[in-house]
Image (cartoon, rainbow, N blue to C red):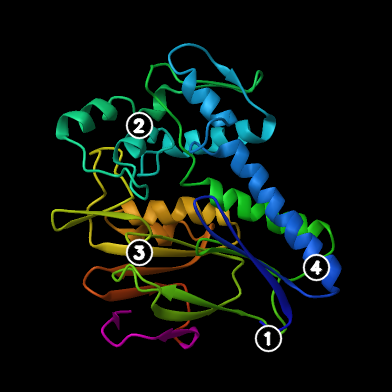
Amino acid sequence: MSDFLSKKYRGLGTFIELSLLDVEKSKTTEKIEQGYRKIAHYEDLFTVNRAFSELIAVNQAAGVKAVALSEEVYALTKKAVQVSQEHFGFNASIGPLVRLWHIGFADARVPSEQEIQKMLAMVSPDDIVLDDQQKTIFLPRKGMSLDLGGIAKGYIADKVVEFWKETGFSTGIVNLGGNIQFLGLPLKGYWRVGIRNPLTHGSSLLLQVLTASTSVVTSGIDQRYLERDGKSYHHILNPETGYPHVNNLASVTIFSEKSLDGEIEAKRLFFSEEPEKVFAKRQNVIQAAVLITKDKEIKILGLKPKDVRLMDKHFKIIN
């Protein structure tokens, strides 16, 4: 990307890389910095891993009172709650379980069955009270809490690209920990995207994909995990069982227009027992998908074979 200007940051609990096609160095650098400031601003609004945010205020008032939110925070939280009420696996009220396991943090541990059952009683999106007129959210039981970690990165990536577009830039990349949102297309007419091997907990490339999609989002077992007594526990918790979700998928990569949609649909396919059927029904939102199993098999949905290159011969494409 020799024609691009890029800068790297830390935020949202991961690495961040922002890139813009360099039209004028000082102007491009300024827009990249402004893009990062937008990310930091949204992190301040949505995080549950700091001393205070609007979302933390909702969680602290659980069982006590409704909390008024800014329009933007209310809109995203409402979206997350409504999607959670579809009960396909994504659950914005999973905060108590996330804190209990705390996978990805230094104090991560395997909780007892008793602890898990206690927290499961707090994971109940159907009980959350939304008031559109007052822009308030009420968590009716003490101990309930919201966590938008499964949706916020996508929303933020969309917002940064929207900002760049509004300020006159035509081509750029927002990379939030491997979840990518593109602005426009390079001159060659497609983006070259790498998909990691989800079984190695490393950065080795498994696939190289050519795509004109504007968003690429992956949910997988390698992104955050905990190892205890010879067992590995990934961070994607099942809100029905309280444990990391068990299936044969190692990762799901979604190609879509919006990163927010990609975040949601990646979870939808990851939790589904029949992800190919879900893909077939969701093609109004999902442009393409890549499913990688623990058996080292790869299913390509919605991509042309010529646009996919296998980089590791230990895996096989089964289309």
* Mark 3: amino acid: Ser
Tell me if 202 is positioned left or right of 180 in this view: left
Position of residue 132 measured from the top left corner of the image (x, y, whole percent): 62, 23
* Mark 4: amino acid: Thr
Which residue is labeled 4 in the image?
28
First to last magenta residue range: 306-319
Q: Earlier in the sequence, mark 1 or mark 2?
A: 2
Q: Are marks 1 and 4 in contact (CB under 8 Å)?
A: no
Which residue is labeled 1 in the image?
188
Cα distance in 3D space between marks 1 and 4: 21 Å
Cα distance in 3D space between marks 3 and 2: 24 Å
Q: Residues within 10 Å of mark 2 (few under 14, many from 20)?
A: many
* Mark 1: amino acid: Lys
Q: Earlier in the sequence, mark 4 or mark 3?
A: 4
Cα distance in 3D space between marks 2 and 4: 42 Å
Which residue is labeled 2 in the image?
96
Q: Residue at x 21, y 38 (%)?
A: 111
Which residue is labeled 3 in the image?
251
Cα distance in 3D space between marks 1 and 3: 29 Å
Q: Earlier in the sequence, mark 2 or mark 4?
A: 4
What is the secondary structure assignment of the residue under circle 3? strand
